[in-house]
Every structure is written in C-alpha cells, then in structure tokens.
C-alpha cells in the first residue's frame, strides 16, 4: 500500500468544510488509445470554462453511471477477468453494476466525443440516450474494455465520485462522427501522445492514472486482460494506493 502526496490530489475541486461527507457516486471514464509507430496516443477533451466541476481541464470522456445502462443489449460481454476486478474491492459491486459502469463509459464516449464503440449490426432499444447507436447501426461491445484504475474522491468535497477508469483502442470504434457527440461537455477533443497529455492542464488524479497506464503499456503493449488495477482512496486521513 503506497501513500499519495498532497500534490496528487485534484486542487481544482472545492472543499465543503462544514458539510457531512457525501457518499461517492459511481462514475465511468474511458481512456481511448491509439498507436502511432512506437508511440501511444490518448483521446482527451477540454471541459468548458463555464462548468462548475473542473472547468477548463482536459479530461477523458466520462460521467456518472446510469444503473439503467446495465440492461442495454451488447454484442459481447465483459471479459471474465475484467469483470472479476470490477466487482472486487471495497463496496458491493455486482456483475450488473459492473456492466452498467462499463456501458456508461461507452455511452459517455459517444455523447461527448462522437465515437461509438462496438460492432456494426442491427441494434434496438427504447432508451433515448442510446439512439445514436440505433441510428448508426452499432451494437455496443464490452469484451475489448480493460479496467486500468479506480479512484474515490476524498471526503468533504462538494462532488464525490467512485470512478472506474477503463481503456479501449481506437480500433474498437465502429463509427466516428465527424462533428463529435450530441452534448457540449467537451471542446477541443484531440489525440495527444501520452507524454504531452501528462503535461496538459489536467486533474492530478488524471496525471497519476496516465503515469500508471504508461508503465503498464511498457510491460504489456496489448493491454492483456486481467492486468493490475491501482486503486486510490483516503484511508485514515492518508491517500493510499492499493492493487485490485
């Protein structure tokens, strides 16, 4: 168990000194990767300056998990080793909850970046926020997703999330919409080399996750299933790193 320094805490978040600790909500983030020769690129976008949460920061596509996403049909399921790690650790994470987390990451990547991860084919659902997949004939697919990190926002923050960072490859994208996604969550969506991404204006936990991912890719360039998953959280007033 390794201790994080205060410099690794996101300084962009406000602190609610007098408030009761807020229970963290499930959130999902997708780190989309591409290869350019021997270099790895990562997709990031800048949050609008008017947003209350992390304005102006470069982030990965993502957001709060919708439990209803667990009922969305998919072409493939989570790899068993990835599901096992998503359901491990503190708190009760059922397979259905793990599935919702993974599908929320895919949905948010479509909504914020216009990238539909899955397989071409006939897809049907009544859910309004999945109609882009219906219109473009893409069946969401979970098998390629890799669980690469988890972090819980410290107590006494005005917003708290239990965020699972998932990764996928650009080759897993079935459709890239030229005008981006239907929401205005992100602007300046760009592909950045990992080294440049770490130097961008990003939250400290994002930088930490990128460093972890770069180390993992150096050992395992294909991101094989079942790799180690660092987990960051506050324990007895210390920020610690555990491996799931």
Image (cartoon, helix red, strand yellow):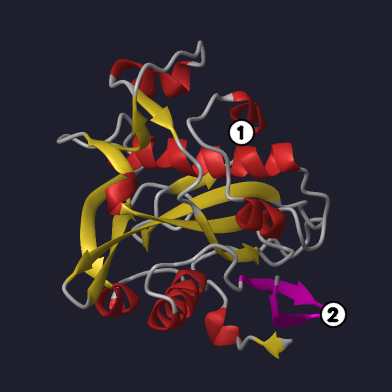
Above or below, comparing residue 153 to residue 194 in the picture: above
- Residue hosting label 1: 66
Q: Give the residues drawn in magenta, as a range.
A: 229-243
Q: Please state the horizontal and vertical placement of residue 157, each as a whole percent of the image.
A: 66, 61
Left or right of residue 170, residue 155 in this image: right
Left or right of residue 16, residue 111 in this image: left
Q: Please state the horizontal and vertical placement of residue 148, each as a whole percent of the image.
A: 54, 65
Q: Nearer the viewer, residue 241 or 39?
A: 39
Name the residue rendered at 52%, 72% in the picture. 205
The part of the image, by quadrant, that contains residue 99 is top right
Looking at the image, can residue 141 be seen? yes
Query: 10 Å neighbourhood of mark 1: few (<14), some, or many (≥20)?
Result: some
Looking at marks 2 and 1 on the same chain, the residue that comes earlier in the sequence is marked by 1
Asked whether the beta carbons under mark 2 and mark 1 sit within 8 Å of each other, the answer is no
Residue 115 counted in the magenta span: no
Looking at the image, can residue 158 be seen? no
Q: CA distance from mark 2 to mark 1?
A: 30 Å
Left or right of residue 38, residue 228 in this image: right
Name the residue rendered at 57%, 39% in the picture. 77
Could you tell me which secondary element the residue under label 1 belongs to? loop
Above or below, comparing residue 44 to residue 133 in the picture: below
Could you tell me which secondary element the residue under label 2 belongs to? loop
Q: Nearer the viewer, residue 204 or 167?
A: 167
Give the overall secondary structure of the magenta segment. Answer: strand
Q: Quadrant of the C terminus?
A: bottom right
Q: Nearer the viewer, residue 123 or 186?
A: 123
The part of the image, by quadrant, that contains residue 168 is bottom left
In the image, which disc is placed on residue 137? none
- Residue hosting label 2: 236
């Amino acid at each position: 168990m390794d201790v994080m320094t205060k410099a690794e805490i996101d300084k962009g978040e406000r602190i609610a000194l007098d408030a009761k600790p807020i229970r963290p909500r499930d959130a999902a983030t997708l780190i989309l990767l591409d290869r350019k020769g021997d270099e790895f690129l990562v997709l990031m976008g800048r949050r609008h300056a008017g947003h209350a949460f992390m304005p102006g920061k470069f982030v990965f596509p993502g957001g709060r998990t919708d439990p209803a996403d667990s009922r969305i049909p998919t072409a493939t399921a989570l790899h068993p080793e990835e599901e096992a790690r998503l359901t491990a650790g503190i708190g009760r994470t059922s397979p259905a909850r793990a599935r919702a987390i993974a599908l929320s990451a895919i949905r948010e990547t479509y909504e914020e970046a216009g990238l539909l991860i899955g397989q071409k084919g006939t897809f049907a659902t009544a859910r309004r926020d999945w109609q882009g997949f219906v219109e473009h004939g893409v069946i969401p697919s979970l098998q390629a997703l890799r669980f690469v990190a988890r972090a819980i926002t410290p107590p006494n923050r005005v917003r708290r999330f239990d965020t699972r960072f998932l990764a996928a490859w650009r080759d897993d994208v079935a459709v890239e919409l030229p005008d981006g996604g239907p929401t205005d969550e992100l602007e300046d969506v760009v592909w950045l080399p990992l080294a440049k991404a770490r130097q961008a204006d990003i939250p400290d936990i994002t930088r930490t996750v990128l460093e972890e991912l770069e180390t993992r890719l150096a050992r395992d360039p294909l991101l094989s299933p079942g790799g180690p998953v660092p987990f960051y959280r506050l324990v007895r007033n210390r920020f610690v790193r555990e491996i799931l």
